[in-house]
Amino acid sequence: MAKITSRAEDYSKWYNELVVQADLAENSGVRGCMVIKPYGYAIWEKMRDELDKKFKETGHQNAYFPLFIPKSYFEAEEQNAEGFAKECAVVTHYRLKTDPNNPKKLIVDPEAKLEEELIVRPTSEAIIWNTYKKWIQSYRDLPILINQWANVVRWEMRTRFFLRTAEFLWQEGHTAHATKDEAIEETEKMIHVYADFV
């Protein structure tokens, strides 16, 4: 095994070398993305399973929301776009075609432009709350306690394994409550769940 740079000497280099030598992850052919290797993924599964159990014990249910979010959803809720507007991946077309000048090459079909651009999920607030407004007709529909295990895409300029990559796995809870006090109580309960887990 190769010698690892000391943490005191160069923290960033030490961290990356540790991840690679522990066989947790490696860089992929996609800029800013990583391959999570079996040992690294097994750690993720153990963490996910333990947290999932704790979430369900507090009444949360898992759901899944689309990876693609219409740009208008971000525009409608400006606070969602504010933090991510400059680091989003955007889908503009829905088809490739063979390049007429080079049959071994593919190009984006200019005739296949989407009517509305789709943002590849940097977070799910916009799509989740667009859905919740259909689910919530009165206070009797509350509380809603939803958790989502998903991946997100943020076009990071400087990447680091597991901490900052263009695509990463995560969990996000989204709840809706009848009163402010119920929302605060839920927030404090979940902070304790995370703290106990850590």
Image (cartoon, rainbow, N blue to C red):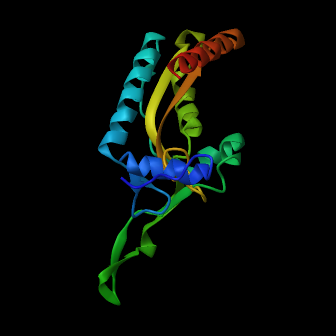
> Where in the figure is residue 162, as x and y percent of width and height?
49, 44
* Residue lying at 47% horizontally and 25% vertically, measured from the top left: 147
How many numbered callouts?
A: 0
Q: Report x, y in % for residue 60.
A: 46, 17
Closest to the observer: 15 or 182?
15
Q: Is residue 179 above or below residue 172?
A: above
Looking at this view, is 171 or 117 the one in front? 171
6 on left or right of 75: left
Coordinates of residue 68 in the picture (x, y in percent): 47, 48
* Image height of 123 relative to 2, above or below: above
Q: Is residue 97 above or below residue 167?
A: below
Q: Is residue 197 visible?
A: yes
For residue 22, side relative to residue 178 (left or right): left
Above or below, comparing residue 47 to residue 166 in the picture: above
Which image quadrant for residue 2?
bottom left
Q: Whole-percent x and y of residue 46?
A: 36, 28
Q: Residue at coordinates 63% horizontally, 17% vertically from top-left?
A: 187
**Residue 24 seen from this side:** no
